[in-house]
Image (tube, rainbow, N blue to C red):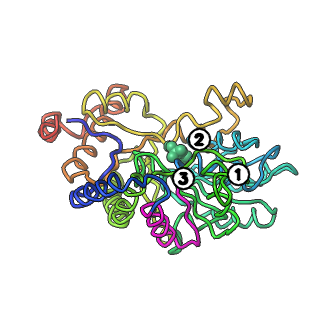
Amino acid sequence: MKIPSTMPFFRENDIHEISEELQKILRNGRLILGPYTREFERNFREYCGVKHAVAVSSCTAALEIVLRYFDVKGKEVIVPTNTFVATSNAVVYSGGTPVLVDINPDTLCMDPRALIENITPETKGVIIVHIAGIITPEIEEIKQICKDMNLFLIEDDAHAHGAMINGQKAGSLADAGCFSFYPTKVMTTCTGGMITTNDDGLADYAISLRHHGVGKDLENIVNLGNDWLMDEISALLGIYQLKALEDNVKRRNEIARGYAEYLENIEQIELFTAPPNIRYSYYKYPVVLSRNIDKKKLIGKMESEYGIHLGSAYDPPSHLQPAYQKVFGYKKGMFPKAEGILKRVVCLPMFVQMTDEQIKYVLQSFEKVISNILIEEGRVNDSKYPSTELSAVAGIFL
Ligand SMILES: Cc1ncc(COP(=O)(O)O)c(C=O)c1O
């Protein structure tokens, strides 16, 4: 038995209802821009507490549309280095230059000090990424900096469906939010994305751009757009995934509490704990390993000995990706805080349908691997778990 780092989840009853609705879509032949897309958008904007939600084909498309609206051509956009490259790639494809900056190791999010240091007369705006579903308490400071310096602020919400700060949902915290519904995410439409905003102009622009720049009809093209539509079948999946989102985020938080209760007692691990006014979505469950643990070895042993796949958030960060080094000249050592922390971060498996036995198995395997690595390296001389005890647990799954 293998335990993946993440997995999509559809409730049995939802699978049944989706199958029925799918037949209706196939019979009536309306495959784009129909009632399912409209319903998904209406429900999503109500869930996030914003005026508009515009469904698109991916988060990357959402980001590019919003960046084009803010006219970043020839300008700089500040992006944290620890994100998936899609965030900064969208700046490039919108004609701008991504300026990567360092992060706060305590939050894994953009460091407001690094933001201030990198603002130039060419800076047009900022993208904040709620990495792993963590909203940084420093978002208030980041918002204030953007306001004072007249910069737009976009949330990359690819990880943050259902995350909240002071009761306000991710997607409603900045000028625009860009969500991903890629299969690994907190909710999925297979592939897909959503723009959330209170800006009427942006909503109109997004509706045009996602469909080749359509004006009053396709004979009247008013913008240079692209094929960035969400189809009706994806929207149908989105409607059901959104209905389940609150329950699913609660379950993710429950799993996280189970993880935390156990891991708090392990000296070699540090956790990211949400302050009382913030709810993480727990797209991922990142932990920080002490410096004396070889991360590569730990990931390898978890996979080969226990069938458990660990994730990352993100290592290597964007500035160490070969393409970014080649095109923009980024080098190792430029963002010491990100480099220092990310090489010590691993993410434990996190998916809604994880059983309590699987959670226990992950935790005990993790502790065992850590203690074995320390023994092998001569740092301690005894394992807390005798191997027979753990293999009894492992036997359930392997
Ligand atoms: C932080 C972040 N931003 C953007 C994206 C791009 O999302 P999509 O695949 O929907 O374009 C991803 C996808 O993994 C992501 O993790």
Find residue 221 and name its label.
1
Q: Nearer the viewer, residue 151 or 287?
A: 151
> How far, Cα to Cα, is label 2 from label 1?
27 Å
Looking at the rendered structure, which numbered label has been put on residue 56?
Answer: 3
Relative depth, front residue between 35 and 228: 35
Mark 2, other Cα within 10 Å: few <14 / some 14–19 / many ≥20: some
Q: Position of residue 85 (x, y in %)?
A: 59, 38
Find numbered disc 3 in the image and state the secondary structure of the residue it sits on. strand
In this image, 367 relative to 311: left or right?
A: left
Amino acid type for the residue under numbered disc 3:
Val
Q: Dominant secondary structure of the magenta stretch?
A: helix
Q: Is residue 339 visible?
A: yes
Density class for disc 3 (Cα within 10 Å; few <14, some 14-19, many ≥20) is many
Where are the magenta residues, as a range? 35-56
**Gap in Å between the C-alphas at discs 2 and 3?**
15 Å
Q: From the image, tell me which residue sits under label 2.
A: 86
Q: Which of disc 3 and disc 2 is earlier in sequence?
A: 3
> What's under tag 2, amino acid-wise?
Ala
Answer with the quarter of the image where residue 379 lies.
top left
